[in-house]
Amino acid sequence: MSYLTSLTTIRDNYVAKLEAISGLDNDKPSYSVDGRSYSWVEYTAFLSQAITDTNAQIIAAQGASEISTNLTG
């Protein structure tokens, strides 16, 4: 599996997780149970940032791939 394919898979997994917990039917509140906190707002923010960061890595990898192709081709 290539680096670019791995990044795309990672990004797609983040998107799937975000879609699974988002939406009108699946909105979840943040809460604490037995001293453990579950913050869905923070988790969705984390997933959104992870998607943005992974997209940037994909763009950089595509650029690096194009550069190496141009050098060898």
Image (cartoon, rainbow, N blue to C red):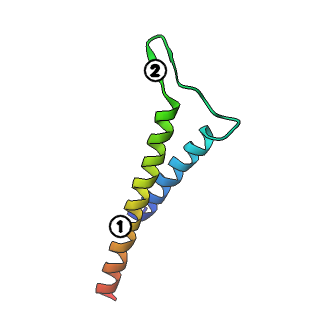
Mark positioned earlier in the residue sequence (2 or 1) = 2
Q: Compared to 73, does 41 lie above or below?
A: above
Q: Indicate the position of residue 50 as horizontal and vertical percent values.
A: 43, 48
Q: State which quarter of the image contains the C terminus.
A: bottom left
Q: Which residue is mark 1?
A: 60
What amino acid type should be assigned to the residue bearing mark 2?
Ser
Quadrant in the rendering for residue 53: bottom left
Q: Of residues 14 and 22, which is closer to you in this image?
A: 22
Circles 2 and 1: CB atoms closer than 8 Å? no
What amino acid type should be assigned to the residue bearing mark 1?
Ala
Badge nearest the viewer, 2 or 1 = 2
What secondary structure is marked by label 2? strand
Q: Indicate the position of residue 11 as horizontal and vertical percent values.
A: 48, 54
- With 24 as the anchor, is 6 left or right in this view? left
Quadrant in the rendering for residue 56: bottom left
Q: Indicate the position of residue 22 as horizontal and vertical percent values.
A: 61, 40
Quadrant in the rendering for residue 21: top right
Which residue reaches farthest left?
Answer: 71
